[in-house]
Amino acid sequence: MPVIQCDIREGWTDDQKRALAKGLTQVVAEVGKVPVKSIHIVIREGRGLHYMFGGEHVPEYQPAGGG
């Protein structure tokens, strides 16, 4: 039973998260040759402050257009 954990910065829409989970499920089923029903996806969201790359915090999410 594969369990896929995906950490993303908050700001993704529900539709984007559904598409992400669906895509991950399809790839794992295909590559791992396992039934879709056995695949579990966990999506965790965090603020930019919770992520750091190269010693710098990731900025908070800003929708396209800066608004």
Image (cartoon, grey):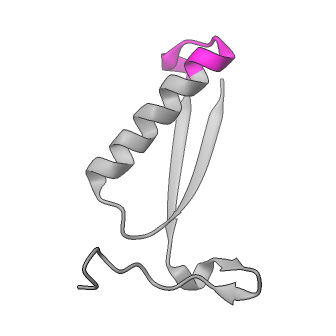
Task: Name the residue located 55 percent from the left edge and 12 percent from the top edge.
Answer: 35
Q: Quadrant of the C terminus?
A: bottom left
Q: Is residue 13 magenta?
A: no
| Residue 21 image-quadrant placement | top left
Reply above or below: 37 against 17: above
The furthest residue to the right: 55
- Name the main secondary structure of what is drawn in magenta: helix
Residue 50 sits in which quadrant?
bottom right
Tell me the residue at 34%/43% (across/down). Answer: 18
**x, y percentage for residue 53?**
71, 77
* Number of numbered discs overlaid on the protein picture: 0
Does residue 35 belong to the magenta stretch?
yes
Please state the horizontal and vertical placement of residue 13, each as a whole percent of the image.
Answer: 29, 59
Q: Which residues, given as a range, are shown in magenta?
A: 29-38
| Residue 63, image x, y percentages | 29, 75
Give the left or right position of residue 54, taking residue 66 as reference. Answer: right
- The residue located at (45%, 33%) in the rendering is 23
Q: How far from the left and from the top, in percent, is residue 47? A: 50, 78
Quadrant assignment for the N terminus:
top right
Extreme-front residue of the structure: 65
Q: Judge whether 64 appears above or below 44 on screen.
A: below
> Which quadrant holds residue 30?
top right
| 54 lies left or right of 4 | right
* Foreground of the two, 3 or 56: 56
| Residue drawn where x is 36% and y is 69% of the image | 11
Check the image and report above or below for 62 versus 29. Answer: below
37 vs 56, left or right, is left
